[in-house]
Image: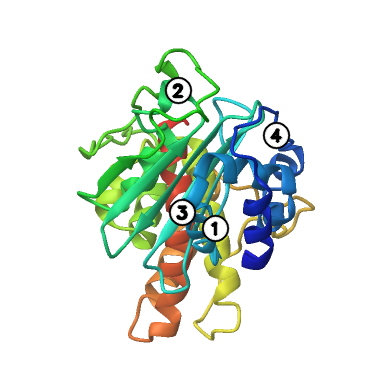
Amino acid sequence: MKYKRLYLVLLSVPTFSFAGNLNLNPYLENPSKLSKIDSNSHIQNELAAVLGEDYIKFSKNFEVLSTPYKLKMAKAIYSEGRTKAGSDASAMTLYADGRIYAAHYNSQKHTVRYFTNDKSCSTVLHPTIQVFIKHYPNVKVEFVNSNNSVLRYNDGNGLGCSSPTSRTVQTYPIAPDNPAQAAAREVASKIWTQSIANSLDMNNDVGVVISNTVKSILACSANFNLGPKPLGVGDIIPGTSYFIKPGLDYLKDYFYEIIPYLAGLSGAQPVYKACINVAAANNRSALEMASLGI
């Protein structure tokens, strides 16, 4: 984020909250454009109106961007960022109708400050923010503007923020006749942890996130000499004119190439392991939201 520009935007925000839809089409069509969202003055003004004095701190945490996630429940998109040191982080969910849900984590205080302009979600965390705070066990949550004038929406008297998740880990069994699910869970355990893999509802959307995470790992390690490299999403299937699509089938079909490759990256060289660690951090929220059907 360009902090000087953000500071000027904050100074230009009026003391009252102003309504207005958010034009999210460029980001929904191409989520990678979220890296330029700091130049969208309307969205930044809306964020600043909701976040108030926390706006600058919130924005500074987007030094490293995680993989954005398009919500299934509405025309909305989730974005998450963290500092280069990885200590502090921020998250926001933007709805096309103007609703905003945002939070930032302070590692020194071990607190998450939560902001929204939706009255029905002002004392209950939005589902996407619930996923965000799972990264910080036993964190203290501060509902900053629960009685604030920026609360101009009231989406269903809290139904929009009914909890789809909990802090208790739920384990999902794998269908005995579904080898694709078993393959996906094994790959997930090598990228994240076994406990995270076991907590996933292994649907095809989760398979898509895992597949794209593997693709990120392959791109990061492109110059490493670690033996045969598995094909990734977007590569041409040998002997055909078709491209590999992300999903459970990809993880099943290339399982015996992916697993040894990940094992090679997990060896003694930190630079190799970093490719897995960075991809895992960048895609964890998207993974868990896909599992929850958010």
Q: Residue at x 31, y 42 (%)?
A: 142
Label 2: which secondary element: helix
Q: Quadrant of the N terminus?
A: bottom right
For disc 2, the marked residue is 119
How far apart are labels 1 and 4 at the CA level?
18 Å
Give residue 224's position: percent from left, percent from top: 54, 84
Give residue 129's position: percent from left, percent from top: 41, 40
For disc 4, the marked residue is 22
Label 3: which secondary element: strand
Label 4: which secondary element: loop
Label 1: which secondary element: helix
Circle nearer the viewer, 3 or 1: 1
Give residue 29's position: percent from left, percent from top: 74, 41
Most distant residue in the right direction = 241
The answer to whether the residues at label 3 and label 1 have Cβ atoms under 8 Å apart is: yes
Residue type at tag 3: Ser
Say which of 208 and 292 sits in front.
292
For disc 1, the marked residue is 59
Give residue 54's position: percent from left, percent from top: 47, 52
For disc 3, the marked residue is 90
How far apart are labels 3 and 1 at the CA level?
8 Å
Residue 99 falls in which quadrant of the image?
top right
The answer to whether the residues at label 1 and label 4 have Cβ atoms under 8 Å apart is: no
Residue 162 falls in which quadrant of the image?
top left
Say which of 152 and 257 sits in front.
152
Numbered circles on residues, count: 4
The mark nearer the N terminus, 3 or 4, is 4
Dot 1 crowding, Cα within 10 Å, few <14, some 14–19, many 20+? many
Residue type at tag 2: Lys
Left or right: 186, with 18 as reference point: left
Q: Which mark is residue 75?
A: none
Circle nearer the viewer, 4 or 2: 2
